[in-house]
Image: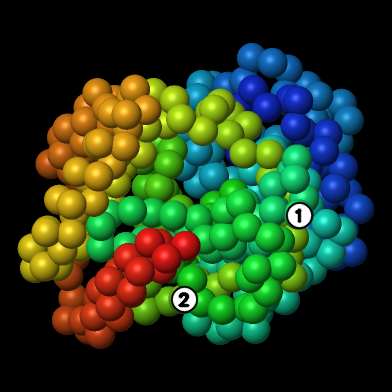
Amino acid sequence: MEVSVVIPNYNGIAFLDSVLASLEGQTLKNFEVIFVDNGSSDGSCSFVAGNYPWVHIIELPENYGFCKAVNEGIKASRAPYVLLLNNDTEVKEDFLEEMVAAIRRHKRAFSCAARMVQYHDRDRLDDAGNFYNALGWSFARGKGRDIHTYEKEEQIFSSCGGAAIYRRKLFEKIGYFDEEHFAYLEDMDVGYRARIYGYENWYAPDAMVYHVGSGTSGSRYNQFKIRYSSRNNIYLIYKNMPVLQIIINLPFLVAGFGIKILFFTLKGFGREYIAGIKNGFQISKKNHKIPFKFQNLSNYFRIQVELWVNIFRRLCG
């Protein structure tokens, strides 16, 4: 068994035939698929069992969110590599082969992210690696750009959990996906955590996946997404940054969150964004920070430099 593919699902029956059929035709054959259902009511599990009997199904009694679903899949996996794949995707025939080859090339890699392409406009990128900056902004590099914009295999800040491969054994060292997140920024959190421990995240452009986007949560901007994104962003900062680093970045963070409040107010979601910030402080109080260790000091320094550089990367497009 070379790789375990984990697909979390919640009422995504409309997308399942596309993703599972594309996996069925892979050039790499030695893999398993673990389908983790979050209490769907649309017959997703019956559809998978009836049409793709080779898929291992884990049924959860209710919607516990993305993090618990993928954690259950990771723990049930049998391969040394775990590949997380959104239910609203379709992959090229050499996708698994390219992803496994990419993570094997980089011995310090915690994860490798695929080149994600817009499903309905296949000349445009959806995600070419995730980045985070000192303004407290997480962003997908290349969104909406020409598909050939990012062709180089290179290090990124974090991998998008919608199509990324991970070294399974490292979850036991750095921890699994934080289920407090429920959904949104959980992939940035675990990628950030891996960086603190000295591991790397890479972009693998030869692994191509077509992504519908918002297949479970709905539209790009909605109350649920905005509230959880701002909530989890506060928690991510509290959890991963030592106190001194928070102080250093505070002017940038105040500016960044202020701009976001204005942006979402103009979009009609200002209250939801502010409510998410308040909730973020509340959950931070009851959760633990990543323990600061002097042996990781150089890693924190490299991360901080990237946080500053990524401001310009984001503003310059």
Snapshot quadrant of residue 80: bottom right
Q: Position of residue 287 (x, y in %)?
A: 20, 45
Looking at the image, residue 41 lies above or below residue 160 = above
Q: Please report the residue visible at 63 percent of the width from the left and 78 percent of the height from the top.
A: 153
Residue type for callout 1: Asp
Residue type for callout 2: Glu
> Which numbered disc flags the more N-terminal residue, 2 or 1?
1
Q: Which residue is mark 1?
A: 123
Task: Please name whichever residue, 126 or 107, is drawn nearer the observer in this view of the structure.
Answer: 126
Residue 15 visible: yes
Q: Position of residue 158 (x, y in %)?
A: 46, 64
- Rounded to the nearest whole Å, what is the CA distance between mark 2 and mark 1? 29 Å
Asked which colour scheme the image uses, the reply is rainbow
Looking at the image, residue 86 lies above or below residue 278 = below
Direction from residue 53 to residue 251 in the image, left or right = left
Q: Position of residue 115 (x, y in %)?
A: 67, 62
Residue 3 visible: no
Residue 200's tag is: 2
